[in-house]
């Protein structure tokens, strides 16, 4: 029985080696952990899904709201306030994205140069994790600021425009209290 188990293990291991890795082709990336789109997104301060918990729970973000200004009937004062939220978000996100890309580059170079150690990996991954958290908070907080500018009806319309018509999605007013569903 032990020989059969060993043989099965060997066959499974060989089969696993026959299939290409889902990472195949990524070994040529400038920074192995990030795609070119991710790098450019971080450097430009884009949200890249970092605020998805807010977006999908009735807390729209400033960029998409501004893009839908006509459908939402934004007032000039609302548009100006949202532009301010967006500008503040971007001003905070870009330097964090630059630092994140720099740290990912540094981590990649440790492995490229074959000089990675347990200690250097731990330090860099902690720094990267902190930067990712700070960047995510910047984007999530911009969504919090956005709902304070919009009416419950505008949020409902936004959710419809974005395709979030699930009746279970709560809609919040500027105080953060639930106001029904979209």
Image (spheres, rainbow, N blue to C red):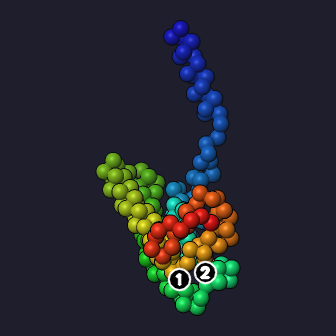
Corner quadrant of residue 164: bottom right
Q: Residue 82 carries which label?
A: 1
Secondary structure found at label 1: helix
Residue extending farthest to the top is 1
On screen, residue 19 above or below 148: above
Q: Quadrant of residue 98?
A: bottom left
- Residue at point 55% right, 63% down? 170
Report the residue at 31% width, 51% height from top: 119
Give left or right: position of 165 versus 179. Answer: right
Position of the C terminus, as image quadrant, is: bottom right
Separation of residues labelled 2 and 1 (CA atoms): 7 Å
121 vs 149, left or right, is: left
- Who is closer to the viewer here, 126 or 170? 170
Circles 2 and 1 in contact, beta carbons < 8 Å: yes
Left or right of residue 161: residue 177: left
Tell me where residue 133 appears, x and y as whole percent. 41, 62
| Depicted 129 relative to depicted 160: above or below | above
| Residues packed near mark 2 inside 10 Å, few (<14), some (14 to 19) or many (20 plus) | some
Q: Mark 2 points at which residue?
A: 66
Front residue of this view, candidates 152 and 83: 152
Give the x, y percent position of residue 51.
Answer: 51, 65
Which mark sits nearer the N-terminus, 2 or 1?
A: 2
Residue at 59% x, 88% y is 75
């Amino acid at each position: 029985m032990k020989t059969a188990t060993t043989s099965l293990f060997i066959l499974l291991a060989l089969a696993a080696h026959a299939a290409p890795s889902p990472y195949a082709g990524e070994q040529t990336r400038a920074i192995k952990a990030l795609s070119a789109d991710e790098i450019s997104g971080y450097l430009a301060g884009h949200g890249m899904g970092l605020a998805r918990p807010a977006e999908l729970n009735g807390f729209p973000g400033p960029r998409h709201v501004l893009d839908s200004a006509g459908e939402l009937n934004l007032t000039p004062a609302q548009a100006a306030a949202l532009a301010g939220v967006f500008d503040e978000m971007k001003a905070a996100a870009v330097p964090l994205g630059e630092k994140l890309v720099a740290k990912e580059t540094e981590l990649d170079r440790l492995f490229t140069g074959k000089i990675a150690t347990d200690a250097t990996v731990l330090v860099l991954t902690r720094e990267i994790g902190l930067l990712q958290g700070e960047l995510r908070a910047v984007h999530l907080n911009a969504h919090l600021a956005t709902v304070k500018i919009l009416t419950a009806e505008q949020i409902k319309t936004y959710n419809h425009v974005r395709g979030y018509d699930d009746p279970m999605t709560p809609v919040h007013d500027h105080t953060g209290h639930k106001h029904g569903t979209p």
